[in-house]
Amino acid sequence: MAKIDGRVTDKVLSLWKSKGKTTVLKTTGLSMMPTIEPGDEVVLRHIEGDEIRRGDLVTFKVGPEIVTHRIIKRIETDGKVSLLQKGDSGPRSFPLPAECVVGKVIEIRLKSGRDAIPMTGLLARSFAQLVALLELLFAGPIRSLSDALNKRKQAGKPKGLASFCYRNALRLRSRTIRPLLKAMRLLCRRRIKRENL
């Protein structure tokens, strides 16, 4: 998971309770590569779970951890909202309740300290929605193939065709989505003046 530095938990929790307020947090972890690299900072704005849309980068509190992932689908069941989310470099997605939302990423400040990617601009939002749609298309087949591999492993059977298909589905996903994410990081950059929020 793309983890937020654990020393900022109190700051994050205060953000969680103050709608509209923003805060800047430094990230660690690799699950959001190449969109968010370790050492980048994310600017979060607190919003409610029902305001989140496909493609948004959202920070969640999951147990003791604070993680940032991309939303690929909203799921409403019996009046409750959950968010299907995943890291950009991870193969699997899983739902989290909307109540776990801490905030939405509105800007990524690159670790160089000179550039940022505003996630609220039209170009960045378009890239984000396209990536989320592609992730949704790949999620079902990758999950099915992974489940098939696990069943074969538990039954003591050779991996066979399921392993070949799984590896190639992951490779195709990576070759489709990774260039889009790199292009977004390059095309949406802008120079910033550093300030404390």
Image (cartoon, rainbow, N blue to C red):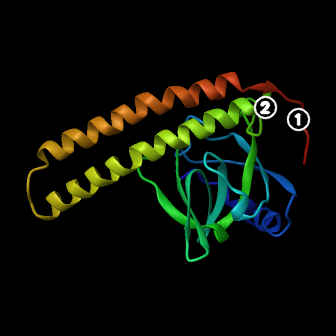
- Residue hosting label 2: 113
Q: Dot 1: what SS?
A: loop
Describe residue 121's horizontal placement relative to residue 150 as left or right: right
Distance (Cα) linking label 2 and label 1: 7 Å
Could you tell me if residue 139 is visible in this image? yes
Describe residue 188's horizontal placement relative to residue 181 as left or right: right
On the image, the x and y values in percent for residue 79 come to 61, 75
Q: Dot 2: what SS?
A: loop
**Image: 180 above or below 147:** above
Extreme-bottom residue of the structure: 78
Q: Nearer the viewer, residue 197 or 55?
A: 55
**Image: 16 above or below 70:** below
Extreme-front residue of the structure: 78
Q: Residue at x 35, y 39 (%)?
A: 170
On the image, the x and y values in percent for residue 75 come to 54, 63
Mark 2 neighbour density, 10 Å: few (under 14) some (14–19) many (20 or more): some
Could you tell me if residue 89 is visible in this image? no
On the image, the x and y values in percent for residue 47 come to 78, 60
Q: Residue at x 26, y 43 (%)?
A: 166
Q: Amino acid at mark 2?
A: Gly
Q: Amino acid at mark 1?
A: Arg
Q: Residue at x 91, y 45 (%)?
A: 196
Q: Disc 2, disc 1: CB below 8 Å?
A: yes
Q: On the image, which quarter does residue 33 sit in?
A: top right
Describe residue 165's horizontal placement relative to residue 73 as left or right: left
- Residue hosting label 1: 194
Q: On the image, which quarter does residue 186 sit in?
A: top right
On the image, the x and y values in percent for residue 91 come to 41, 47
